[in-house]
Image: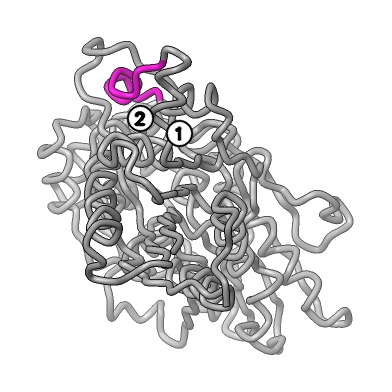
Amino acid sequence: MTAPTDARAFLRALFDTAVARAQPAQVLAPYLPPPPRGRTVVVGAGKAAASMAAAVDALWPADAPLQGLVVTRYGHVPPGLPQPQARIAVLEAAHPVPDAAGQQAATRIAAQVAGLGPDDLVLALISGGGSALLAQPAPGITLADKQALNQALLASGASIDEMNCVRKHLSALKGGRLAALAAPARVVSLLISDVPGDDPAVIASGPTVPDPSTCQNALAICQRYQLPLPAAAHAGLASGAFETPKPGDARFQGHAVHLIATPQHSLEAAAALARAQGVAAHILSDAIEGESRDVGKVHAALARQVARQGQPVTRPCVLLSGGETTVTLGTPGAHPRGRGGRASEFLLSCALALQGEPGVYALAADTDGIDGVEDNAGALITPDTLARAQALGLSATDHLARHDAYSFFAALGDLVVTGPTFTNVNDFRALYLPG
């Protein structure tokens, strides 16, 4: 079988296939429990919450009672969702920095699970982004406090595990507290993972699962990254007053947790498509973390080794990876800050490291369709990316220094724009080396 000759179309097809594998309507059905003797209440939060709710509503028996409420990011409600007639209401709020709408949604979600009994069932639909969307602060902490801390966390370079450790200890619902509020009802959590390692306690800061991390862990993270902590937050962490429910807590007995879509699932789907088209596919990892520009350099080095030495694999091939990289903004004022997310920054660094290496093409994008806070999912690079940029008077080095990869790729016409995909299994990266 001949490998694809249109590298751009091939890479885009791989990305679209990865996203399709994570669509709730395609994967949720096998994990739905039967209706209980009592009530069924659906709650949820995340970038995929609305599409997950739509899938549950469509699959749940028409004659079985169903009610609930989920919150998703602004603009992440699928077109045609039957609102307000649907049995599960959908609210929208801000991400990645929480807003008042997220706080109000969290209050209403908490009310949904109050007063349930042992014959009742809670279906918790949790996906990436849920941490910011469930914005109910711990006692004594204001929404403004949480907003400032979230902004500081996002700029700090902290890993997603570290960020969510802090978030859950300063929350009224995260870190297992939502499930604790639902006791003694049974909770079945259906999760779409956007975190390296797929730890349910990390996905959306684990609102329905026990939390093994501690207040002291959260405080140490804040100190490590010199994060500004309000007095009430520091006191609650230092004293242990903000401790979360731990593994072994009786309130979680009989609960179930199912990962219905993960980064690995999506990478495997993309790999299967590549192989069906005669291209050897190699999944490097589904859990790569680190600075986007550093990860870009490493991927470039791997691609160059394949291109020049035929090691450790030979052409035609595609190298696939997932995970969640970070972009550390550094000292304010050091450079004028531009536009761009971690996928586009990865690619700009990768292009600089490749220096026009013949026969290497790459796509990087966020599977939720939004790279950072921009309107693109990611971008593409080709062997002539730097040459085309130079012809336009663009300096790749300067754009990278000021975190302005969006403007760089927009000028080249190489942004990947999908709009919200209504799911989220985090970063997708593919480097294609035709034969």
- Which quadrant of the figure has residue 213? bottom left
Quarter of the picture containing the N terminus is bottom right
Q: Identify the disc placed on residue 24.
A: none
The amino acid at mark 2 is Gln
Q: Secondary structure at mark 1?
A: loop
The amino acid at mark 1 is Val
Q: Position of residue 19 (x, y in %)?
A: 59, 61
Q: Determine which residue is flagged by label 1.
A: 97
Could you tell whether 118 is left or right of 135 in the image?
right
Report how far apart the C-alphas of labels 2 and 1 lie in the structure. Answer: 7 Å
* Residues in magenta, as a range: 394-404
Any magenta on residue 402? yes
Q: Determine which residue is flagged by label 2.
A: 151
Could you tell whether 403 is left or right of 11 in the image?
left
Placement of 342 over or under 145, stated as above or below: below
Let me know if residue 318 appears in the view. yes
Q: Position of residue 411 (x, y in %)?
A: 53, 21
Task: Name the residue rendered at 28%, 23% in the picture.
Answer: 397
What crowding class fits label 1: few (fewer than 14 Cα within 10 Å), some (14-19), or many (20 or more)? some
What crowding class fits label 2: few (fewer than 14 Cα within 10 Å), some (14-19), or many (20 or more)? some
Quarter of the picture containing the C terminus is bottom left
Q: Position of residue 33 (x, y in %)?
A: 64, 86
